[in-house]
Amino acid sequence: MLETARDLTLEAARDASALRRPASTSVPTVQLKKLLDSRNEREVLEGLRKVVALSYRQPAPTGPPLLFSSVIKNIASPSLPIKKLVYIYLLQNAEHEPDTALLAINTIQKTLSASDPHLRALALRVMSGIRVPVISQIVNLGIKKGCADMSPLVRKAAALAIPKCWRLDPSTSPQLLEYLTLLLGDKQYFVAGAAVIAFLQVCPDRLDLIHKHYRGLVRKLVDMDEWGQLATLRLMLQYSRRCFPQTTRRVTKNGSKSTKGFYGDEESEEEDDHEAIEESYLDSDLELLLKHALPLLQSRNSAVIIAVTRLYLYLAPSDSPYITSAIGPLISLLRSATDIQQVALYNIVQVALLHPLSFVPYTTHFLVRSTDPPQISSLKLELLTLVFPHAPPHGQSLILSELAHFSRASTPSMIQEAVRAIGRCAQSSPPGSATSLRCLRLLLAQLSSSNGSLVAESLTVIRHLIQANPDAHINTVTRLAKNLDTMTNPQARASIIWLVGEFAGINNGDNIAADVLRILIKGFVDEAEEAKLQIVLLGAKVYLLHLNREQERQQEHNQQDEHRDEEQSSHPIPKLYHHLLHLVRYDSSYTLRDRTRTYRALLSNPASTQLASLLLLAPKPIPSAPSPSESRKGFTLGSASLVIGSGGEDGMAGVGSEGFNGYESVPEWVQLGQEPDKRLREEEVGGGVYVPAAQRALMVSASERLDALGGVDDHDHGIGIAIGMGAKKAGKEKTLDDWLAEDEKGVADDNDSEEEDEETEESSDEEQDEGSDEDSNEEEDSDEEEEEESDEEEDERATLMK
């Protein structure tokens, strides 16, 4: 005992000192070999730890690993820590020494028959992990033996070994599918979860194997671990889309099913068509899946919550309460770490694009914090704009105040996102409404800012708003033109000049376009190239409108060409236009000179301006500013392509509409009439129905809980059981219910004995009454006989006397 304590103390001190000092660069191979060949388990364990640490610290060996044979010979050690380290080393280096690794297979096979289930499971896991194709049949036999093992740990290891064996030798698929079918119907929930993981890797398209296990897997879903739940939810989404058709039924407004008239009159049919509405209804098996997935929204794993939301989003009807119930758990993920929060926001935005009204009560959760990174901030601003059209007035005011605050931020990217968000809020509001006007006032107030990027982005958004309703913003364009004297940002000046050109045709030329052109030509040389392009465009539009007015005037008054030419030459607009062409001729920009030549060619013939009017004065389409996540709307919720597959504005590469390699989209609903028969999903008779652990806890009576606290082991410690009709455990101690049942039985027996005594007394009385009746009858008969005899004697006496 003292010697063992001393060894433990020395080992702990050695480990503590090893943590304080830096790791040694190299350990002599001779010393390691001496430790591995030692007969002391503690020295062997120390040598194995050093060898495994070196194998992970150094790069992967290109040749045969050192000390492989010395490590492998310790595989027969009875010590479990030594076995685990040898197994780890064997899995890492078996490919480099396949011949030597095969020598350990015999020992691993013997471990499959060990009494400890943990050793059996570990041996099966290691045997399947040795990537040597020669042992595929041995691994297959080990999986077969593990599937029939009594321990669920071993059966789980067998399920996880099936994909590894399939990768080693795909020709073993028929046998592996038989094992997989057996494990899918296992009564233990963690075995079934591992079988689903193997199924998705080996044969994800063989949905015919799932039919008879569908209801069992759905009931076990709540008890599985997180990995099993994720795999099962993914499988059930694919299965439901391919096996349950999307069906609707006609229902009248009062909630009853619509029916035709008694005699099938056309009038009654028309009335029913007007009153009836179509609503979607769920198959009973599909509704079973949605109900059993509901408790998973309380999971501590964020991936499980997103998987359940994906299930509801693509399977449940849009008006069902299932989607609404998933919104709260999704919002709770915003309190997680930054990386989880970012992934959750991508998925929340995806759901909000389809169901924005459900997020209105959670508007305050999307307010940006000062500690949020830029990507999370932009996603929150996008969520605010999606919720804005459906929010109440006080909510809209809160959102606009938030956006106005962040439009004055110090980061250019944040300014751009905030201003664009204000523009999307204005576009989602009705034109001319108070909300739209407030958004416009917020944007116009930014024009006085010294931040050039803020002014430029604000003007871009204002231009989009003016194009949506040009008649209501004539004064706004005049106000913007007055800012050209103080505005220095080239992009902002170009936006204002373009707006002035768009409004050059109103009021039959009685506007500020010609005066703005005159002022801009004075400082044309000092303008940037962006502004110069818009000035040339403005000049071409003003000159074209002047030519069109002159043609209309000529047609009205039928004037001569000479008089028209004289008036045209004396008008200031042609002079401004030709002066502008002269200035551009000596500009250094090739693009500007080429654009000007195009305008000159179009307007070279004043009598023919149809083509120029078609190109320059054509009505422009109303610009729309969709949500940045609209490009990702086609990706599946919870997929990697949804999070990192966007491209363009945020600087990411983008993957197009196909997603990354391995991306799986949600399949289409199966057509009505092509779905498999519902009877295929019926469970076997007599197999029992799986009851989740939470329901089993509710089914346990108080007496059984007291007995369990007292030491009666009446449960299986969290392992799923099959509850059958009349199933009882033999040989257990008497419980409180048994004692009460015996007391009730004793009372019933006493009552029965009293009833029997009363019955016997009543029967004896009845017998006595019957006996007395018989005696009285006999006495009456005897009296009658005596009377008859006396009568006969009197008759004889009378005859004698005669």
Image (spheres, rainbow, N blue to C red):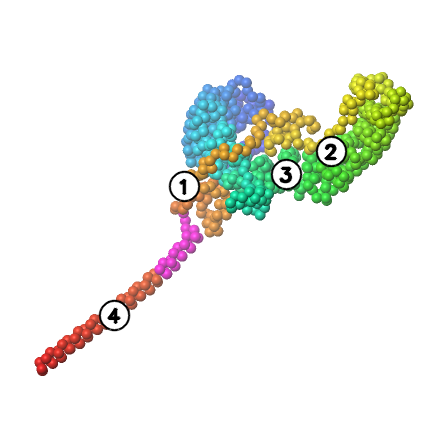
Identity of the amino acid at label 1? Gly
Given this view, does label 2 or label 3 mark the residue nearer the observer?
3
Q: Quadrant of residue 575?
A: top right
In-front residue for pair 92/483: 483
Q: Position of residue 207 (x, y in %)?
A: 49, 31
Q: Which residue is mark 2?
A: 420
> Label 4, label 1: how many angstroms apart (C-alpha)?
63 Å
Of marks 4 and 1, which one's residue comes earlier in the chain? Answer: 1
- Using the image, determine if residue 294 lies above or below residue 162: below
- Using the image, determine if residue 366 lies above or below residue 74: below
Of marks 2 and 3, which one's residue comes earlier in the chain? Answer: 3
Q: Position of residue 772 (x, y in %)?
A: 25, 70
Q: Which mark is residue 355?
A: 3
> Label 2, label 3: how many angstroms apart (C-alpha)?
22 Å
Q: Which residue is mark 4?
A: 773
Disc 3, SS: loop
> Label 2, label 1: how many angstroms apart (C-alpha)?
64 Å
